Image (cartoon, grey):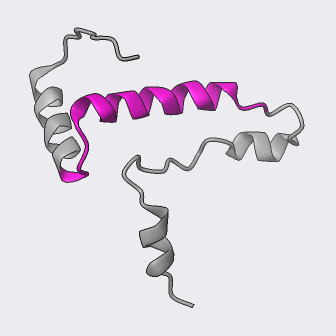
Amino acid sequence: MKAKLTIELNELVLKRATLYSKNVGMSLSDLIESYLKSIIEEDNVTTKHMNDDLKKMFGIAKVPVSLNHKEVNRKRFY
C-alpha cells in the first residue's frame, strides 16, 4: 500500500534530484523510496559474525539504485 508524504527540500537539491531521477529513468518518489529502503536494509544486516577488519569495510561501497546487473555482466571484459 502506498502512502503520501510531504517533505521540504532545499530548492537546488530538489532540482538536482529531479534531474538525476530522470537521467536514471526513475520517478523522484521511487528514487527516494529506494534510498530509504537501502538505509533500512543496511541497518538490518548483521555483522556480529564478521571479524573486525571486515566490519570496518562493511558498507563502504555504494551501488547506484539504477545499476542494471544484467547490463554490467554484458560489458565485462575478460
Which residue appears at 68% of the width and 25% of the height?
Answer: 44
Q: Position of residue 32 (x, y in %)?
A: 33, 29
Residue 39 vs 53, above or below: the answer is above
Part of the protein shown in magenta: 23-46
> Could you say where residue 5 lies in the image, as x and y percent from the top left?
27, 10
In this view, the residue in front, 47 or 21, is 21
Question: Residue 40 magenta-drawn?
Answer: yes
Residue positioned 25% across, 51% down in the render? 24
Q: Residue at x 33, y 11 (%)?
A: 3
Q: Is residue 70 left or right of residue 15?
A: right
- For the point 23% across and 50% down, the residue is 25
- From this view, report whether residue 68 is shown above or below residue 26: below
Q: Residue furthest front?
A: 1
Asked if residue 25 lies left or right of residue 53, the reply is left
When asked about the image quadrant of residue 18, the answer is top left
Q: Position of residue 43 (x, y in %)?
A: 64, 25
Question: Does residue 19 lie above or below 38 as drawn?
Answer: below
Tell me the quadrant of the picture where the N terminus can be found.
top left
Horizontal placement of 16 versus 77: left or right?
Answer: left
The relative height of residue 19 versus residue 76 in the rendered view (above or below) is above
Q: Which secondary structure class fits the magenta region best? A: helix
- Which quadrant, please, contains the C terminus? bottom right
